[in-house]
Amino acid sequence: ANFAVCLLISLGSAILLIIDPPFLNRHILRGTASFFLGGALYYVTVYIVNHFYRLRYILYALTLALWTAVFFSFYIQDLVPIIKQMGIIGRIILEGFPHYVLFPLTICSLVLLEIGKGEIFKPLNWFGDISYSVYLLHFPLQLAIAILVSSSLISSDFYLINTAFVLFFAVLGLISYFTYKYFELPLQHILRTHFLLPRKVLQSAAISTKTKD
């Protein structure tokens, strides 16, 4: 799909989110909107790199200003009630701002920053490596904690502890790291060794035979 198709599908899903018809699942719509927005953002980022790379500092400044506004609204003065008073316009802003302005600008700025400064995010590669394990294990870990709380093995006030959120992600990250290192990586090696390499060898042999013929 090209830029136009990705953008149209994403915007169409976002419009349906705002309309909120009862026969459509909001989670699926949100996922569709975000997925195809990512595709559109790829084309935009490539275009900026090829034609407007010198303007990257403007994007950096804009992204920083928007995040400052977000932190201001979250920690100092909540702007959401004011925006909600704007009716449908306010709803469009609340739905569209994070997904179509803040997050795309942030991702684009980070990509441009890495292109300009080299592999400055390489020390964080491990987080990307364990992301699939985090995705698979976060719910079982939540379920395990809920079972422990319901069994009175953990205090029912656990969820109200300020450090509980940090502790949860620390444990999740640790489990995900060991799962990736001792399960996912060996499994990848087995699959590549026994399935992908033989296929590549057969393809090379077929190409070589055709060349000789």
Image (tube, helix red, strand yellow):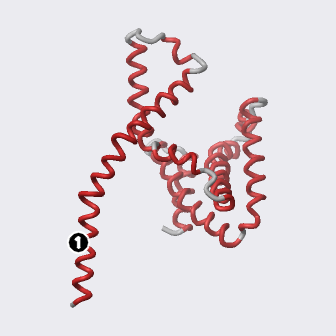
**Whole-percent x, y for residue 102 in the image:** 67, 48
Residue 31 position (above or below residue 138): below
The answer to which quarter of the image holds residue 198 is: bottom left
Residue 135 position (above or below residue 162): below
The answer to which quarter of the image holds residue 150 is: top left
| 17 displayed left or right of 198 | right
| 180 displayed left or right of 9 | left
**Tag 1, which secondary structure?**
helix
| 152 displayed left or right of 163 | left
**Whole-percent x, y for residue 128 in the image:** 50, 47
**Whole-percent x, y for residue 28 in the image:** 45, 46
Dot 1 surroundings within 10 Å: few (below 14), some, or many (20 or more)? few
**In which quadrant will I find the C terminus?**
bottom left
> Closer to the camera, 138 or 178?
178
> Closer to the camera, 111 or 105?
111
Identify residue for label 1: 202
Residue 172 position (above or below residue 199): above
Q: Residue at x 44, y 33 (%)?
A: 138
Q: Residue at x 33, y 41 (%)?
A: 183
